Amino acid sequence: MSKHRHKQVRAKRANGPTVWVDEGMKDFLEILWDRGINTVLSCQENRPGVAWVEFGSPDDAIGFLETAWDLADEEMRDRIEGELEVAGMWEVNANQWHLEDGIFTLSVGLRLPVSDKDRLVALLTDQCDLTDEPTVLAFQQQQSLQPGLPS
């Protein structure tokens, strides 16, 4: 049983059933599902300031990473790349699952700063107009004012 207890709410999978998820992950997961990106597990904060999502396949993880990259500013891209040790660096790991005799599949886990997750939710739900520089700058400034979170 997980030591991380967060309020659970119902989230709607695209063309599928509702499922219970951490309240802080609901909007993020629904956005991913609406874009055809499958997830299997998640936690709104399984380390201080860090969200976690497990994608159903490497293709789902790659789809998410490419979407995030397209929306990211230079600082977030530094955290996504993983080539340099930077504060708030995204962590990716693969997990093998034995399905039956000699048959395996992979899921891919991703840890990212809660602030990056929340920024992506805002960008993906058009709360920020990417063509309107003052709006994007105001959002970035708002995020940087949150104590203890990477901007």
Image (cartoon, helix red, strand yellow):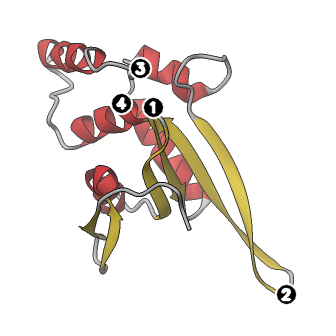
Disc number placed over residue 101 in the picture, else none: 2
- Left or right? Give the position of 77 relative to 91: left
Circles 3 and 4: CB distance less than 8 Å? yes
Quadrant location of the C terminus in the rendered image: top left
Q: Amino acid at mark 3?
A: Pro
| Placement of 3 over or under 103, stated as above or below | above
Query: In screen coordinates, is 57 left or right of 116?
Result: right
Residue density around tag 4, few if under 14, some if 14–19, many if 20 or more, within 10 Å = many
Q: Is residue 150 above or below residue 56?
A: above
Residue 87: image location, x then y, percent: 55, 18
User: Which residue was labeled with disc 3?
Assistant: 150
For the residues marked 1 and 2, what is the alpha-carbon distance in whole angstroms? Answer: 38 Å
Q: Residue furthest bottom?
A: 101
Label 2 or label 4, whichever lies nearer to me, is: 4
> Residue at 59% of width from left, 26% of height from top?
81
Of discs 4 and 1, which sits in the foreground?
A: 4
Q: Earlier in the sequence, mark 3 or mark 4?
A: 4
Distance Cα–Cα, label 3 vs label 4: 7 Å
Q: Amino acid at mark 4?
A: Ser
Residue depicted at 86% across the width and 81% down the height: 102
Residue 115's label in the rendered image is 4
Binning the other alpha carbons within 10 Å of mark 1 as few (below 14), some (14 to 19) or many (20 upward) gives some
Q: CA distance from mark 1 to mark 3?
A: 17 Å
**In 3D space, how far apart are the residues under numbered discs 4 and 1 (Cα atoms)?**
15 Å
Residue 105: give x, y in percent of width and height: 71, 70
Type of amino acid under label 2: Asp
The residues bearing labels 2 and 4 have C-alpha atoms spaced at a distance of 42 Å
